[in-house]
């Protein structure tokens, strides 16, 4: 197990690089606990509820000119969408850290006689706390791109893999066995997967037609006869493709077949645990002739050199003469690419220059109820 001494941290707040002013940074992340106790319990029973996050920093007070930590952190109290990011071991490309969009809640200058006058600044979360990776942190004067980082794919709702979980064996009255082969892929919603199951069952059927639906209230699938007169059987355990059935993935008990009816609803809740791509940008300095522009995107590809089919996943708002920060709208999976990099385009006359840090994180969308 590696240990880390915190001495070369990079800490940013919107357009400010706070590192040289601070000696403490905190990110708090947890789930609100609800009392789930009942009469008869001899111990308090808690139930996890919504997630919550906050950020705070402690540093040396510096009442300099406009743009120093004191003036900015003081004036931002009560403001929303202020971005804290921290990286414990510098912030080169590939460095790990955390990023949180906040509502600024508190600024406390404080001190004791004979000691340094300090400040504490706090913000409460307006986003997920993102476990982040730096894609680029540099000063740039021309168009370019960073080094691709292998951060993995963004998982969709259900991942159907050929030869692993892509078969649904079923029987209908006069023709006996049939097999629906579900197209391999990452399905972003329950409804999308249900539609594919319905399509492939009807393609394989001879006697009946079928519907397949997903309920966002019960989080279960229902497979039912639509037209025809025959009962149907879902051969989870005795079918020729039982080893590669989709049944477990859609919540059915596959230890036994379902037989003798015209409609079946899955036995277990099949809730989504998809992922989302989170991305952020801090621009801490800009110079030029007043017409300078910076456009930053994040792209993904299946190849480390982005030579196969790079796709733009995040586009940040163009930056001109003003510094600041952006927290992009999260992007839902499924995205099968696993290599990610930042690319930027710089325009303007003279010698335009921008100093910026761009990063990303792939996070599970816990508790989501996707349609």
Image (cartoon, rainbow, N blue to C red):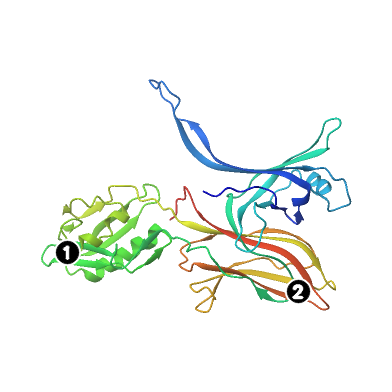
Q: Residue at x 39, y 62 (%)?
A: 192
Q: Which of 121 and 116 is in front in this view?
A: 116
Q: Is residue 329 left or right of residue 371?
A: right
Q: How far apart are marks 2 and 1 (CA)?
A: 62 Å
Query: Tag 2's secondary structure?
Result: loop
Label number found at residue 110: none
Q: Residue at x 80, y 39 (%)?
A: 118
Query: Tag 1's secondary structure?
Result: loop
The residue that label 1 is drawn on is 240
On the image, the x and y values in percent for residue 268 come to 31, 47
Q: Which of 112 and 98 is in front in this view?
A: 112
Which quarter of the picture shows residue 212? bottom left
The answer to whether residue 117 is seen in the rendering is: yes
On the image, the x and y values in percent for residue 230 come to 14, 60
Density class for disc 1 (Cα within 10 Å; few <14, some 14-19, many ≥20) is some
Q: Do the residues labelled 2 and 1 touch (CB within 8 Å)?
A: no
Which quadrant of the rendered structure holds the C terminus?
bottom left
Depicted 34 relative to depicted 155: above or below: above
Q: Which of marks 2 and 1 is nearer the N terminus?
A: 2
Q: Nearer the viewer, residue 295 or 3?
A: 3
Density class for disc 2 (Cα within 10 Å; few <14, some 14-19, many ≥20) is some
On the image, the x and y values in percent for residue 42 come to 41, 20
Question: Mark 2 or mark 1: which is in front?
Answer: 2
Q: Residue furthest right?
A: 65
Depicted 210 relative to depicted 364: above or below: below
The residue that label 2 is drawn on is 141
Count of marks, rendered view: 2
Q: Which residue is drawn at 80% across and 48% down?
A: 69
Q: In this view, does 330 lie to the left or right of 229?
A: right
On the image, the x and y values in percent for residue 350 come to 83, 78
Q: Residue at x 23, y 54 (%)?
A: 263
Depicted 151 relative to depicted 218: above or below: below
């Amino acid at each position: 197990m590696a240990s880390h001494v915190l001495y070369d941290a990079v800490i940013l707040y919107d357009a400010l690089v706070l590192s040289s002013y601070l000696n403490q940074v905190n990110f708090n992340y947890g789930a609100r606990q609800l009392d789930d106790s009942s009469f008869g319990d001899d111990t308090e029973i808690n139930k996890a509820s919504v997630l919550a996050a906050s950020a705070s920093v402690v540093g040396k007070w510096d009442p300099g000119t406009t743009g120093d930590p004191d003036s900015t952190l003081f004036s931002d109290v009560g403001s929303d969408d202020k971005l804290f990011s921290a990286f414990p071991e510098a912030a080169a490309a590939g460095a790990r850290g955390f990023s949180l969009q906040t509502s600024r809640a508190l600024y406390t200058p404080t001190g004791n006689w004979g000691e340094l006058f300090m400040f504490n600044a706090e913000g409460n979360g307006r986003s997920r706390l993102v476990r982040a990776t730096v894609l680029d942190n540099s000063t740039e004067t021309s168009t370019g791109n960073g080094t691709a980082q292998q951060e993995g794919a963004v998982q969709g709702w259900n991942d159907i893999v050929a030869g692993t979980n892509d078969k649904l064996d079923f029987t209908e009255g006069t023709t006996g066995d049939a097999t629906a082969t579900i197209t391999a892929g990452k399905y972003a919603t329950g409804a999308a997967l249900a539609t594919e199951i319905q399509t492939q069952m009807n393609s394989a059927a001879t006697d009946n037609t079928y519907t397949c639906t997903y309920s966002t209230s019960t989080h279960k699938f229902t497979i039912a006869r639509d037209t025809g007169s025959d009962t149907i059987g879902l051969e989870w355990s005795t079918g020729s493709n039982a080893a590669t059935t989709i049944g477990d993935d859609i919540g059915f008990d596959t230890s036994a077949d379902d037989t003798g009816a015209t409609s079946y609803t899955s036995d277990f809740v099949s809730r989504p645990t998809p992922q989302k791509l989170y991305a952020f940008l801090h621009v801490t300095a800009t110079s030029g002739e007043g017409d300078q522009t910076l456009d930053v995107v994040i792209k993904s590809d299946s190849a480390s050199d982005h030579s196969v089919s790079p796709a733009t996943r995040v586009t940040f708002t163009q930056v001109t003469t003003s510094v600041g920060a952006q927290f992009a709208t999260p992007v839902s999976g499924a995205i099968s690419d696993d290599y990610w990099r930042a690319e930027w385009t710089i325009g303007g006359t003279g010698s335009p220059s921008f100093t910026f840090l761009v990063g990303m994180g792939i996070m599970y969308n816990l508790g989501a109820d996707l349609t």
